[in-house]
Image (tube, grey):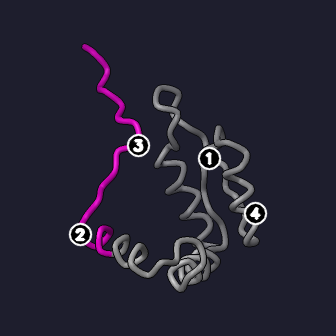
Amino acid sequence: MTAPFLVFAETHIDEAKISGLQACLRSGWMGTATRISRFESDFAAYKALMTASLAFCGRVDWILHPGLRPGLKCVYEYTQSVDPDAIEAALTTAMAS
């Protein structure tokens, strides 16, 4: 039995994402605009953000920068991706407190 192929950076692009990208491109604003401000305020509404314990250190920096707490979770040995059961347990604990 062979292991399933691990797709690197698979994307799911739907019409809403395409329309959003077109709106950004047509506005002429790439890095500072209302969409960026909305993203930043939505992002800041979270108290903590989970990431893989084997993540690049810069990933933790962008969690700390807006004042969030990084939650470092274990990864699967085979895929090196975050264990969804560990994330669910951490979120359940965080929601209870």
Mark 4 sits on what residue?
Answer: 64
Mark 3 sits on what residue?
Answer: 9
In 3D space, how far apart are the residues under numbered discs 1 and 4 (Cα atoms)?
Answer: 16 Å
- Look at the image and tell me in which quarter the C terminus lies: bottom right
Q: Within 10 angstroms of label 1, few (less than 14), some, or many (20 or more) residues?
A: some
Q: Within 10 angstroms of label 4, few (less than 14), some, or many (20 or more) residues?
A: some
In 3D space, how far apart are the residues under numbered discs 1 and 3 (Cα atoms)?
Answer: 20 Å
In 3D space, how far apart are the residues under numbered discs 3 and 4 (Cα atoms)?
Answer: 25 Å
Please report the residue visible at 38 percent of the width from the left and 78 percent of the height from the top.
26
Q: Taking 41 as reference, is 80 left or right?
A: left
Count of number-bearing discs: 4
Callout in the foreground (2, 4): 2
Q: Within 10 angstroms of label 3, few (less than 14), some, or many (20 or more) residues?
A: few
Callout in the foreground (2, 1): 2
The answer to whether residue 15 is magenta is yes
Callout in the foreground (1, 3): 3
- Which quadrant of the view contains residue 19? bottom left
Q: Are marks 3 and 4 in contact (CB under 8 Å)?
A: no
As helix, strand or loop, the secondary structure at mark 2 comes to helix
Q: Are marks 2 and 1 in contact (CB under 8 Å)?
A: no
Q: Taking 51 as reference, is 76 left or right?
A: left
- Which quadrant of the view contains residue 43? bottom right
In 3D space, how far apart are the residues under numbered discs 2 and 1 (Cα atoms)?
Answer: 33 Å
- Which quadrant of the view contains residue 54? top right
Which kind of residue does numbered mark 4 sit on? Leu
